[in-house]
Image: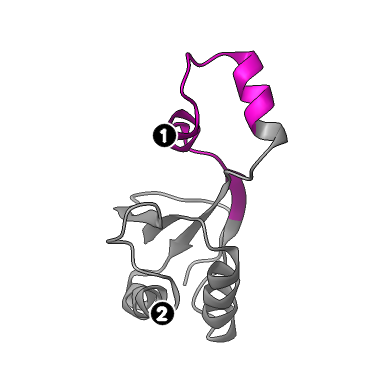
């Protein structure tokens, strides 16, 4: 079993990716709205504080979407193929990041 983590800023592309993965019944996803500290710091030109964070959050949307999923090893290659096809390039700064991690134990899911 593998843990796939994806942080991406393009919500429409993520929806297309998730729909394609679900259509092929490869795995499910949990989606969270997240904000990276680097994006906040890049927007700010003064010392970080709760007040400056409040001002920032009232303005421009700085959020990403974080997806995570437990993916059976035999399905990972297809999921990754869809990810690279449907999500804009991860090699360009600011698009997002992904990681695939080994999972030695898990619970709450049916065995594949």
Instruction: Report the residue at 61% width, 19% height from top.
Output: 52
Residue pointed to by mark 2:
82
Q: Quadrant of residue 12?
A: bottom right
Q: Quadrant of residue 56?
A: top right
In depth, the one of 42 and 89 nearer the eye is 42
Measuring from the top left, give residue 74's x and y in whole percent: 33, 76
Characterize the local packing of mark 1: few (<14), some (14-19) or many (20 or more) Cα atoms within 10 angstroms. few
Nearer-N-terminus badge (2/1): 1
Residue pointed to by mark 1:
38
Instruction: Report the residue at 33% width, 50% height from top.
Output: 104
Measuring from the top left, give residue 16's x and y in whole percent: 57, 77
Instruction: Report the residue at 49% width, 78% height from top.
Output: 26
Left or right of residue 24, residue 59 in this image: right
Q: CA distance from mark 2 to mark 1?
A: 28 Å
Task: Give the magenta part as a residue range.
Answer: 31-56
Measuring from the top left, give residue 19's x and y in whole percent: 60, 78
Which residue is outermost to the front?
Answer: 45
Q: Is residue 104 above or below residue 17?
A: above
């Amino acid at each position: 079993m593998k843990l796939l983590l994806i942080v991406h800023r393009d919500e429409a592309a993520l929806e297309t990716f998730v729909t394609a993965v679900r259509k092929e019944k490869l795995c499910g996803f949990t989606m969270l709205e997240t904000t990276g500290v680097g994006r906040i710091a890049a927007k700010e030109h003064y010392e970080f504080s709760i007040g400056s964070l409040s001002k920032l959050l009232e303005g421009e949307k700085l959020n990403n979407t974080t997806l995570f999923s437990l993916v059976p090893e035999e399905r990972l290659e297809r999921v990754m193929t869809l990810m690279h096809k449907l999500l804009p390039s991860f090699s360009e700064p600011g698009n997002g990041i992904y990681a695939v991690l080994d999972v030695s134990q898990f619970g709450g899911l049916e065995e594949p």
